[in-house]
Amino acid sequence: MEWSQEARYRTYESMTTEERLKLEGSVSASPWRQRYHIQPMYGLLNDPNGFVWFNGRYHLFYQWFPFGAVHGMKHWFHTESSNLVEWENKGVAMKPEYTFESHGIYSGSGFVHKNSLYLFYTGNKRDEEWNRHSSQCLAIMNSSGKITKRDEPIIKRQPNGYTEHFRDPKVWQVEDEFYMVVGAQRENVTGCILLYQSPDLIAWSLLGEIETNEMDFGYMWECPDYFTLQTHGILLCSPQGLKLAGDSYHNIYHSGVWVGKPLNVENGHFDHGDFQELDAGFDFYAPQTTLSPDGRRLLVGWMGLPEIEYPTDSEGWAHCLTIPRELSIKDGILYQQPVRELKEKRKNEARTTMNLSDEVRISSELSGDCFEMIGEIEVVSAKRAGLKLRVGKGEKTLLYLNMETQKVVLDRTNAGVAFGQAYGSIRQKHYSKNKIRFHIFMDTSSIEVFVNDGEMVFTSRLFPRKESQGIQFFAEEGTAKIDVVQWKYD
Ligand code: FRU
């Protein structure tokens, strides 16, 4: 479908009943609707926004274009949860109203202050020549859920030396001062993060760039986030324009963190280690973190990427968010674990242990397209050993340990409807031991694999046929032992 400028830049209330019914009809006929991930009722979802605990509930917004699976006029759609497991759709939270946001309420964050939720976002505006203008804006949600926007931006434009790619504010507090990071592009077309300070969340002054070791690391850094974790300072962002290197940066765009010493907010200096890509799968971008009321640092990402056609696009909807993850640091490495709250969903437990010797074993107890699974692969002498999931006629998704190449591999070559193939169909990461633990979350059209308690994560969309629900275990050219427990979700 070709989208005209007019068709792409409309707000939700202009949707006719006929348009809505058509979208609802095609979405309800989709074989790929998720069962426990946040997904749009129709239209396109992208970045998580404003993830925060406020007024006794988690609030999680996302970028939403209502009219179909393209990037057009972005709204913030609002969801709420008391437990990070069940999410309730609350509807559109913000739509473009003012000139400074006439072409989209772009990404941003939430910050709770004096019993109100401050929502910081980017006002995206295009002028007559279609030049972009970006400003940082504020809306305040009161405790009864009413959102009031300020009628002008709190930061009107980017500072000198930077281009109009200036977006995605994230706010935090240190003692009595508030700080904001904004993703930016220098005039020499390299990405960076700008740091602002405010005494009251309304008046902001520029402190300067966050000073990192990365002066030439992609052309734009989107969706920055900064937080402390244990004794470390963590700077997170989604750089665009990194070049493929070994097993890293195989997707179109990337997300990751630098683990370092706490940021020096006086001079913007950040002393840090190497960039750690957050996810080794195919579909992950623009994550954002928040603090739970019990002090855990939680992260949610967009399970998708821009500029790639997905199989549901023709059905009028696209993408979902990842399950929330809990972050921790071990030996300078960022670990991500599924939030413990998800254990609530465990039902119908099935276990199996297999000693495999150069064979494929079909499990009779285990199968499914919506489940959680924890297991361990121990290779004795096999060259490759692991699991085949979503197995059906000609379809399978492989997760295995390759002892020859010393890699953990996720292979979606034959997973189902192919897409994004320009970026390959195999993802892998170096791993030299013969034993590995894995924790899988499967939903109708996605898989999230947490390896070794979150040392690596592989997040991917999969589009198999509904009937492809088989689970098999294999060892090639030698022996291996595999242990698993599975919980099928309702
Ligand atoms: C990241 C991003 C953000 C922007 C938003 C627009 O995916 O490009 O930088 O604010 O999406 O939807």
Image (cartoon, helix red, strand yellow):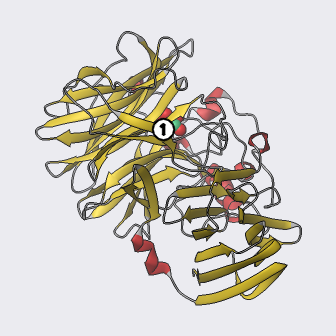
The residue pinned by badge 1 equals: 275
Does residue 18 show up? no
Q: Residue at x 63, y 82 (%)?
A: 483
Quadrant in which the C terminus is drawn: bottom right
Q: Residue at x 65, y 64 (%)?
A: 33
**Quick check: 92 left or right of 255?**
left
**Circle 1: is it few (<14), some (14-19), or many (20+) Cα within 10 Å?**
some
**Quick check: 93 left or right of 252?**
left
Q: Nearer the viewer, residue 197 or 83?
A: 197
Quadrant in which the N terminus is drawn: top right
Picture quadrant where residue 399 is located: bottom right
Where residue 284 sits in the image (x, y, percent)? Answer: 57, 48
Outermost residue toward the right? Answer: 394
Picture quadrant where residue 153 is located: top left
**Quick check: 195 left or right of 183?**
left
Where residue 435 sits in the image (x, y, percent)? Answer: 61, 70
Q: Amino acid at mark 1?
A: Phe
Where residue 143 sits in the image (x, y, percent)? Answer: 21, 55
Q: Nearer the viewer, residue 426 or 95?
A: 426
Disc 1 under 8 Å from ligand 1? The reply is: no
Q: How many marks?
A: 1
In the structure shown, which secondary structural element does the residue marked by tag 1 occupy? strand
Outermost residue toward the front? Answer: 381
Where residue 432 sits in the image (x, y, percent)? Answer: 63, 58
34 in relation to 244, above or below: below
Does residue 177 show up? yes
444 in relation to 64, above or below: below
216 in relation to 236, above or below: above
